[in-house]
Amino acid sequence: MNERQRIIVTGASGLIGTALCRRLDTLGYEVVAYRSRHDGTHGMNQANRTIDKQGLEGAFAIIHLAGESIAQRWTPPARERILNSRRENTLLLASALAGLTHKPEVFISMSGINRYGLRRTETLTEESAPMVDGFLPAVTEAWENATQPALLAGIRTVLLRTAMVLSRHQGGLSKMLPAFRLGLGGPIGGGRQRLSWIGLADLVELIVWSLRNPSIHGPLNAVSPQPLAQAEFARQLGAALGRPACLPLPAWAISFLFGSMGRETILSDLAATPAVALANGFRFTTPDLPAALAAALRE
């Protein structure tokens, strides 16, 4: 790069955002964290529908990762926060990008593999038909649709359909670790449901790769090439920790402990593959689960 290209990142303080901003900085980009502001300056305010458009002018790329945490009880107010934080903020941002004088070259917006539904028997690629059969599928549909103003304005738009991100600090793996370290882990809900996942470092590199690859647009499955049954995931996690992993947790217990959030996340059955990434030459550093778990536990 002849000059430091400016990249604006929402959700920069989260698990993915923190690792991504660090990586972009090492690559020589100027990274700007774009946060929610009460007055609409240097960020956006969903409640007031205000946004700092001037701060967006001339940026090379916008990477939109922000959203209310899914990992909570889905009370009616929580559902509203989860949906609105994705739909309204994304629409506000995409509409602002569409009206800029100097538009970004690329808009990368987070989504999730639940765009394909909750339970599918086939192996899923980016060409698989979307489904809306639950709350999370409806959220991801609204989330992706909200990017339309940017796409219609001619901005290359990437929809990052992400699976469970492996990290010992946050996310699904971090919540499993205490029980598994005590030897209390095991198959959940029968363990036959397929689980898609991705290592944090590979997710960061995939975002950087899609940022720099002009041919990438539309849905992009941010998953490892090797989905597997939940029981096998539990077995390999136990092996990585040197602990047994044979204590089952029935589906009714998940429903009792977590309600619909648990049923749509822990008990979902989706085997997604990164067909677009692989077809266009992306290489995973930890494509298999033992390597990805070892990397996550070393973080």
Image (cartoon, rainbow, N blue to C red):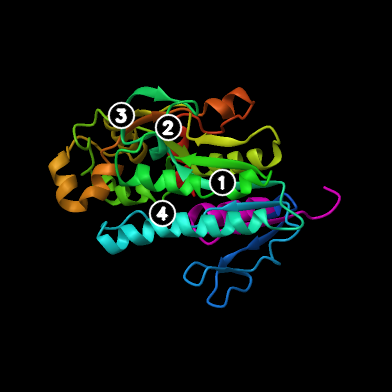
The label on residue 170 is: 4
Front-lying residue, 28 or 127: 127
Q: Return the residue at label 1.
A: 148
Check disc 1 and give the amino acid type. Answer: Gln
Tell whether 205 sits left or right of 72.
Answer: right
Q: From mark 1 to mark 3, how far is it between C-alphas?
A: 39 Å
Mark 1 or 4: the one toward you: 1
Q: Which residues are magenta?
A: 1-24
Find out whether the residues at labels 4 and 2 contact each other: C-beta distance under 8 Å: no
Q: Residue at x 29, y 35 (%)?
A: 234
Label 4 vs label 2: CA separation?
18 Å
Secondary element under disc 4, as helix, strand or loop, is loop
Placement of 206 over or under 23, stated as above or below: above
Residues marked 1 and 3 touching at CB (< 8 Å)? no
- Residue 232, disc: 3
Which amino acid is tagged 2? Leu
Q: Are marks 3 and 2 in contact (CB under 8 Å)?
A: no
At label 4, counting other C-alpha atoms closer than 10 Å, the crowd grade (few under 14, some 14-19, many 20 or more) is few
Disc ID at residue 289? 2
Question: Spatial distance from mark 1 to mark 2, Cα to Cα?
Answer: 35 Å
Say which of marks 1 and 2 sits in front.
Answer: 1
Q: Considering only order in the chain, which callout, 4 or 3, is on the residue closer to the N terminus?
A: 4
Q: Report x, y in % for residue 114.
A: 38, 39
Q: Secondary structure at mark 2?
A: helix
**Residue type at numbered disc 4:** Gln
Labels 1 and 3: the sequence-earlier one: 1
- Which residue is drawn at the image coordinates 55% and 48% (left, top)? 147
Q: Residue at x 26, y 60 (%)?
A: 76
Left or right position of 81 against 220: left
